[in-house]
Amino acid sequence: MKKKLVVLTGAGISAESGIKTFRDADGLWEGHDVMEVASPEGFRKNPKLVLEFYNQRRRQLHTVKPNLGHETLVALERDFDVHIITQNVDNLHEQAGSTKVLHLHGELFKVRSTKNENHILDWKTDLNWGDCDANGNQLRPHIVWFGEAVPAIEEAAAITQQADYLAIIGTSMQVYPAAGLLHYTKPNVPVYYIDPKPATIYDLVNPLEIITKTATEGVPVLKEKLLEKLNF
């Protein structure tokens, strides 16, 4: 039976493919605070602005491709049972070929009913005001906004509990509830943290190895280290 490798990914792995992130230097998008375009309050206040924000991001996603970081995680599936838990809303892991991907914060290429959060549709074009579900309810991006619950967190915790190895790629692990996943790993499970500017990870009792590289440089290093553990 293959060892289970659980991988937590964040904006850093997508940034190398050209995906812009919320946490750019100024934290603004066309002069707007992130809360205006990524919160339930912002959507109630100006839904057309919010829809256009995600239309821009959706259009951009059509123009980018997975990078070596994504592709190396796919290659690891040959020797490990790889489960990816991502905070990213892009589909670059899936584009690369990863087979087990859980999105904590939703998906850019999906939308859902404003009245029924379980009514989810695939959606790769612009979403406009007036686009409705079969019952006439406005559709919204299938994104977990600031202040909303993270429905997938329990499944993510259960997956993390089963890890034989844990890798953290391109995320500071400072934002909850995702940051709390670290504490679901079993004792003595090795943790690898790949980031060119790694943040301090507090209260972690597991063996920790920091790889101070970008995802495209660091994930191949991770692959070598893990294969060495299997005595390849």
Image: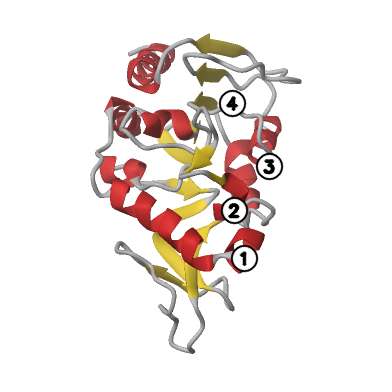
Tell me the number on the disc at residue 177.
Answer: 3
**Disc 4, SS:** loop
Residue 92 sits in which quadrant?
top left
Mark 4 or mark 1: which is in front? 1
- Which numbered disc flags the more N-terminal residue, 2 or 4? 2
**Disc 3, SS:** loop
Tell me the number on the disc at residue 91.
Answer: none
**Disc 2, SS:** helix
Query: Measuring 40% from the left and 37% from the top, which residue is drawn there?
Result: 20
- Which numbered disc flags the more N-terminal residue, 1 or 2? 2
Q: Quadrant of the N terminus?
A: top left
Camera sees residue 132: yes
C-alpha separation, residue under disc 1 versus residue under disc 3: 26 Å
- Which numbered disc flags the more N-terminal residue, 2 or 3? 2
Direction from residue 180 to residue 52 in the image, left or right: left
- Say which residue label 1 marks: 45
